Image (cartoon, grey):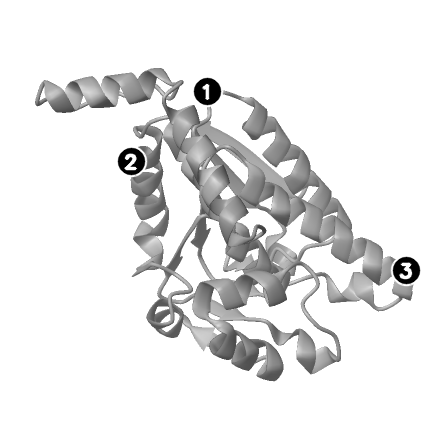
Amino acid sequence: MEYVKLEEKDRIAVITMNRPEKRNALNLEARQELYNILKKIDSDKNIRSAIITGAGKAFIAGADIQAMKNYTVEDAIESSRQGSKVFSYIEKMRIPIIAAINGWALGGGLELALACDIRICSENAQFGQPEIKIGILPGYGASIRLPRIIGVARAKEMIYFGEIITAKEAEKIGLVTFVTSPSILMGKAMELAQKLIQGPASLSLVKQAINSAFALDLNDAFELSSKLYGDAYKTNDAREGILAYLEKRKPIFKGH
C-alpha cells in the first residue's frame, strides 16, 4: 500500500494514513486504499478492534486541494459519494474503531474521525471544517455527523465560520473523549483497544443499534434494538456472561 499502512497487533488492526509530506491529505487513491483495508480487516474474524492514526504531524489535514482545482460538478459529486461510502463503511463495520488524532484533523480528516466510534487526541491536535473558506462545504458527511455529536448550534458555528479549535476545546464540546500528550497517545489508544477486544460479541450488535438509530424513526429503532437484543442470546459470550455473574466470577469472553 502506498498511502495507507496496516499493522496487526494482538487482534488489533492499526491503520496509519501515510502521506506525511502532504499532511496525509485525502486523495482518491488514499481513500480507495483505506476502503480496501477496512474491508480486509472487517472480514478477518481474528481482528476485534482497530485504530486509525496519521503519520508525521497530522492525522489528516483535509482533502487534496491540488487534486480538486480542476473538478467539474460531476467530479465533485463523485468524490463526495466515494468519500461518503468509505466513511459510512466505518460505521457499518462489526468492530469498534478508535481515531487516535495526533495532529491536524481538518476537513475530510475530521469527517473520517467523526465516523469512528471513539475519538482521542494529543494535546497538539487541531480540529476544523474549513471548507467554507474556499467556497465549498464538507463533502464526506460532517454536516450530518457533527450535529449529532456536538449539537446543531456548535456544529453550525464550526462549519459556518470554518475556524480551527484546539484539543481542549474539542474535549469540552464532546468532540473527543480524551486528551493526552503526543508521546503516549498511541499507548492510550492501544489500552482502549485492548479493553474492547476483551469484550463480548455483543459489542458489534450495540454498535449497530446505536448507529442505525439515527437512520430510523423511533418505533423502528426500538424494534431493531429488540431484535439485536435477541441476537445477543445466540452468542456463547452471553451464556458465559450470565453464568459468570451467577457464579460470582469474571467472565471470559471469546468474541463469538
Up-down relation of residue 211 to residue 198 (above or below):
below
Kind of residue indicated by mark 2: Lys
Q: Is residue 246 visible?
A: yes
Kind of residue indicated by mark 1: Asn
The local secondary structure at tag 1 comes to loop
Mark before the other along the chain sequence, 1 or 2: 1
Is disc 1 in contact with disc 2, using a CB cutoff of under 8 Å? no
Up-down relation of residue 180 to residue 242 (above or below):
below
- Marks 1 and 3, how far apart at CA: 40 Å
The local secondary structure at tag 2 comes to helix
Q: Looking at the image, which residue sits at the far bottom? A: 161
Q: Is residue 139 left or right of residue 206?
A: right
Which residue was labeled with disc 1?
A: 46
What residue is rendered at 12% in x and 21% in y? 246
What residue is rendered at 83% in x and 59% in y? 77
Mark before the other along the chain sequence, 1 or 3: 1
Picture coordinates of residue 182, whole percent (x, y) = 35, 57
**In which image quadrant can residue 132 be found?**
bottom right
Residue 138 badge: none
Location of the N terminus (image quadrant): top right
Which residue was labeled with disc 2?
A: 195
- Marks 2 and 3, how far apart at CA: 44 Å
Q: Nearer the viewer, residue 210 or 14?
A: 210
Q: Nearer the viewer, residue 116 or 249?
A: 249
